Every structure is written in C-alpha cells, then in structure tokens.
C-alpha cells in the first residue's frame, strides 16, 4: 500500500494512506489545496497544492476532486462594499415587487 508523508504543524511528519488525503484541484490554481486529519492529534491540516504537489499526490493514488470557481468570483470589484443598511434596504424592496412590476408595465415607452 502506498504511504504518503505529510507534515502536521503540531506533530511533525506523519504517514498517510491516499484515502486519508483530500486533494481539491481548482481551475484557479492558487486555490488548489490538500487536507488531512492528523492521525496522531486529529487536527485538520490544510495546505496549498501547486502543480508539483498535485502531480505527486495523484501519482500516489490520491483522488483529485475538481473545483470550478465561477468567473464572477474572480472579477475585480470596485467601489465600496455593501453595508448592513444596503442589505436591509434590499430586503425591504423585495417586499415591494408587485409595486415595482406595476411601475415597469405602466412606464412610458412600454
């Protein structure tokens, strides 16, 4: 059986089987990672996985899970962040959808 050496921040080097590792390969490479529960202390360890790490783990029989991040999540956003008041105003406006629909139907040019 294949064993894979990894490092726990508390326990140091540990040996794992491929089934003890989770490998997530993201279409946005910097977000790829692998994780495992340390067999000694049970702490969940998560580390980034570059192309070399991914190749080594897949070669060691670790199953890769694909993760596709939508392009919108990677877009640059400008302007101020939404505030709690913005969210509350939006929620209140949702209660007025019937009025908004009437205004759209009766708007000039329709």
Image (cartoon, rainbow, N blue to C red):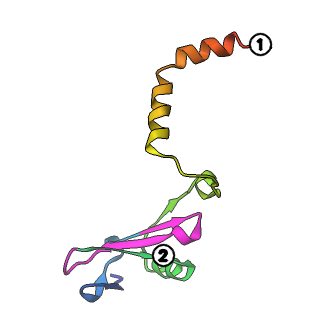
Q: Nearer the viewer, mark 1 or mark 2?
A: 1
| Residue 17 in the image, given as x and y percentages of width and height | 32, 78
Does residue 64 lie above or below 82 as drawn?
A: below
3, 34: nearer the viewer: 34
Magenta part of the chain: 23-42
Tag 1 near tag 2, CB within 8 Å:
no
Left or right of 57 in this view: 79: right
Q: Is residue 44 on the magenta stretch?
A: no
94, 19: nearer the viewer: 94
Name the residue carrying label 1.
108
Q: Secondary structure at mark 2?
A: helix
| Residue 16 in the image, given as x and y percentages of width and height | 30, 80
Name the residue carrying label 2.
58
As drawn, the label of residue 22 is none
Q: Is residue 35 on the magenta stretch?
A: yes
Q: Among all residues in the image, which is located at the extreme front?
A: 85
Q: Residue at x 62, y 52 (%)?
A: 79
Q: Secondary structure at mark 1?
A: loop
2, 91: nearer the viewer: 91
104, 42: nearer the viewer: 104
Does residue 94 lie above or below 80 as drawn?
A: above
Q: What's the CA distance linking mark 1 and mark 2?
A: 61 Å
| Residue 53 in the image, given as x and y percentages of width and height | 50, 81
Q: Residue at x 43, y 80 (%)?
A: 60
Dot placed on the residue nearer the N-terminal end, 1 or 2: 2
Q: Quadrant of residue 101?
A: top right
């Amino acid at each position: 059986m294949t064993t894979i050496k990894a490092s726990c921040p508390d326990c140091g080097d540990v040996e794992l089987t491929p089934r003890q590792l989770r490998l997530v390969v993201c279409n946005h490479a910097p977000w790829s990672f692998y994780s495992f529960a340390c067999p000694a202390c049970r702490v969940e360890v998560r580390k980034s996985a570059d192309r070399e790490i991914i190749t080594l783990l897949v070669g060691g029989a670790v199953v890769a899970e694909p993760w596709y991040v939508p392009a919108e999540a990677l877009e640059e956003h400008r302007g101020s962040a939404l505030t709690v008041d913005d969210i509350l105003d939006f929620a209140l406006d949702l209660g007025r959808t019937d009025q908004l629909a009437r205004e759209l139907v009766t708007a000039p040019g329709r």
